[in-house]
Amino acid sequence: MAQFYDWLGQKKSHGIRLTVMDMWKPFRNTTREQAPQAAVLFDKFHIMRHLGEALDKVRKIRAGQRQRSALHQGTEIHAARTPREP
C-alpha cells in the first residue's frame, strides 16, 4: 500500500475521499497515514465473516450457560425431593 501511495503522490493521496478495502490492519494503517481524510469502507464479505464469527461465539456461550443452568436446576429439584434423614 505504501508503494501505491508513493506512486500516487501526496497531492492526489490527500484528494482521496473514500477507500474500499478488506480489514487487513496494514491497509488501514497505511491509508490512515497517507490519506487521513479518506473515509474507509470495508467490503461486505469481511464484515459478514466477522459478524458470523461473533454470533457463533455468543451462541456457544449461551448454549453453555443453558446447559449449566439445566444441570443446576436438576440438582436442586432432586435435592428438594430427597427425604431428610432423622
Image (cartoon, rainbow, N blue to C red):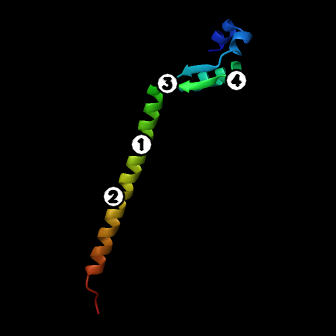
Q: Amino acid at mark 1?
A: Leu
Quadrant position of residue 74: bottom left
Earlier residue among tags 2 and 3: 3
Disc 3 marks which residue? 43
Look at mark 2 in the image and give the residue it sits on: 67
Q: Secondary structure at mark 1?
A: helix
Disc on the earlier residue, 3 or 1: 3
- Residue 21 position in % (x across, y down): 54, 21
Residue contact at pointers 2 and 1, CB within 8 angstroms? no
How far apart are the two marked residues, 2 and 1, measured between alpha carbons?
18 Å
Dot 1 and dot 4 residues touching (CB under 8 Å): no
The residue identified by callout 1 is: 55
> Percent position (x, y) of residue 30?
65, 20
- Residue at x-position 27% and y-position 75%: 78
Answer few, some or many: residues within 10 Å of disc 3's Cα (few below 14, many 20 plus, some between 14 and 19). Answer: few
- Residue at x-position 69% and y-position 14%: 15
Q: Which label belongs to residue 17?
A: none
Q: Which residue position holds label 4?
A: 36
- Disc 3 to disc 4, C-alpha distance: 19 Å
Mark with earlier residue (2, 1):
1
Which residue appears at 42% of the width and 47% of the height? 58
Up-down relation of residue 7 to residue 86 (above or below): above
Nearest to viewer (mark 3 / mark 1): 3
Mark pair 1, 4: CA separation: 32 Å
Q: Is residue 55 left or right of residue 80?
A: right
Q: Secondary structure at mark 3?
A: loop
Residue under the point 36% across and 61% down: 68
Q: CA distance from mark 2 to mark 3?
A: 37 Å
Choose the circle earlier in sequence order: 3 or 4: 4
* Nearest-to-viewer mark from 2 and 4: 4
Q: Residues within 10 Å of mark 4 (few under 14, many from 20)?
A: some
